[in-house]
Image (tube, rainbow, N blue to C red):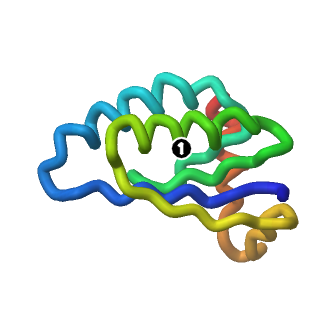
Amino acid sequence: MHSALFIAHPQDDDPNWDAFLEFVDARLAPSKGVTRLAANVWLVNFHHSPEAFGWLLASANHQKVSYGFLQFEHPPQWLPVGFDPTSFQDKAA
């Protein structure tokens, strides 16, 4: 497996959501293989940061935040007319 899309599903007015985000942001900020695509969506590259997926799963389970994930066998191929989220992540570091 190359990567996975991790999608958390916060419930309305869930105090655990803020705790989940705080923990995840602190753990994943220095990880080069993780790109946050939206408020509740992360793209995790297993070749660069295999532990990041574990942090997301563990934190979601601990805070009782529901989630799902989609596995990718090959690297994502971004359309040339769009943008490559990993390019702006590398520039921010």
- Quadrant of the image containing the C terminus: top right
Q: Residue at x 79, y 45 (%)?
A: 46
Relative image position of residue 22 (x, y in whole percent)? 36, 29
Relative image position of residue 13 (x, y in whole percent)? 12, 50
Q: Residue at x 38, y 56 (%)?
A: 66
- Say which amino acid is labelled 1: Leu
In the picture, residue 70 is in which quadrant? Answer: bottom right
Q: Residue at x 16, y 57 (%)?
A: 12
The residue nearer to you, when weighing 26 against 65, is 65
Q: Is residue 82 left or right of residue 74?
A: left
The residue nearer to you, when weighing 47 against 84, is 47
Position of residue 79 relative to residue 4, above or below, is: below
Relative image position of residue 39 (x, y in whole percent)? 39, 52
Position of residue 87 relative to residue 58, above or below, is: below
The residue nearer to you, when weighing 50 against 37, is 50
Q: Is residue 20 left or right of residue 1?
A: left
In the picture, residue 63 is in which quadrant? Answer: top left
Secondary structure beneath label 1: helix
Residue wearing tag 1: 57
Relative image position of residue 18 (x, y in whole percent)? 27, 36
In the picture, residue 79 is in which quadrant? Answer: bottom right
Mark 1 surroundings within 10 Å by alpha-carbon count, few (fewer than 14), some (14 through 19), many (20 or more) = some
Q: Residue at x 84, y 58 (%)?
A: 1
Q: Is residue 80 left or right of residue 53?
A: right
